[in-house]
């Protein structure tokens, strides 16, 4: 049973933990509201974060479809860019997802880090899967940074347009 299978087996726990940790990056009152309100229309930020991380999770553990990944990243990063998060804070949720995935899998299956494998081939498979997982996360982080920069550029364009309109030019 490979790493990705173990990750997918723990999907629900991983996504719930991850969402709660991302919500905790907000002030306490906002965090509480994000976690408690389940209605997508009463809590659009919470809904977009939750659906965004679900879609990122699916691509991280699946085909890595770039257009789906970008759309999922945009769902979260647009919100965080407007809210004034720094670049590292705005894309930091990806590291939260990575750490949540790894910690959950290691908590559930201690054999992944025990030295008692039947063969050296099994060790090699696990090591290679962890390396691949890290490479996938790196790719998502790079994409997220590009998305963040585009969002900030758009915000600045809107501000400039508003200032020109306010001054009659």
Image (spheres, helix red, strand yellow):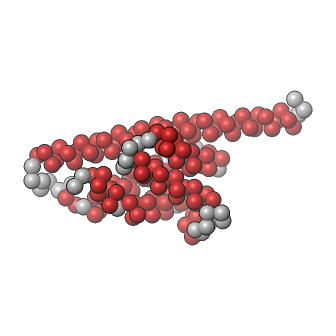
Seen as rendered, the residue at the extreme right is: 168
Residue at image location 49% in from the left, 60% down from the top = 19
x and y percent of residue 99 in the render?
Answer: 38, 53
In this view of the protein, which residue sits in the foreground, 28 or 34? 34
x and y percent of residue 60 in the render?
Answer: 39, 47
Q: Is residue 29 left or right of residue 146?
A: right
Residue at image location 20% in from the left, 45% down from the top = 125
Seen as rendered, the residue at the extreme bottom is: 36
In this view of the protein, which residue sits in the foreground, 64 or 15? 64
Q: Number of callouts in the render? A: 0
The reply to whether residue 86 is in sight is yes
Please identify the quarter of the rendering in which residue 113 is found: bottom left
Query: Which quadrant holds the N terminus?
Result: bottom left
x and y percent of residue 47 in the render?
Answer: 57, 59
Please identify the quarter of the rendering in which residue 163 is found: top right
Placement of 71 over or under 109, stated as above or below: above
The reply to whether residue 17 is in sight is no
Residue at image location 17% in from the left, 43% down from the top = 124
Seen as rendered, the residue at the extreme left is: 118
Residue at image location 39% in from the left, 64% down from the top = 13
x and y percent of residue 156 in the render?
Answer: 70, 36
Query: Which quadrant holds the C terminus?
Result: top right
């Amino acid at each position: 049973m490979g790493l990705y299978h173990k990750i997918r087996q723990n999907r629900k726990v991983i996504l719930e933990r991850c969402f709660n940790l991302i919500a905790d990056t907000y002030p306490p009152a906002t965090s509480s509201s994000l976690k408690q309100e389940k209605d997508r229309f009463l809590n659009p930020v919470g809904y977009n974060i939750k659906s965004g991380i679900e879609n990122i999770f699916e691509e991280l553990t699946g085909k890595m479809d770039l257009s789906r990944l970008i759309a999922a990243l945009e769902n979260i990063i647009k919100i965080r860019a407007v809210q004034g998060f720094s670049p590292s804070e705005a894309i930091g949720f990806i590291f939260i997802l990575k750490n949540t995935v790894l910690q959950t899998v290691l908590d559930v299956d201690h054999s992944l880090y025990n030295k008692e494998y039947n063969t050296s081939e099994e060790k090699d498979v696990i090591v290679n899967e962890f390396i691949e997982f890290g490479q996938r996360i790196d790719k998502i982080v790079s994409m997220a940074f590009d998305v963040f920069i585009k969002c900030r550029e758009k915000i600045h364009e809107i501000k400039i347009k508003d200032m020109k309109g306010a001054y009659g030019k």
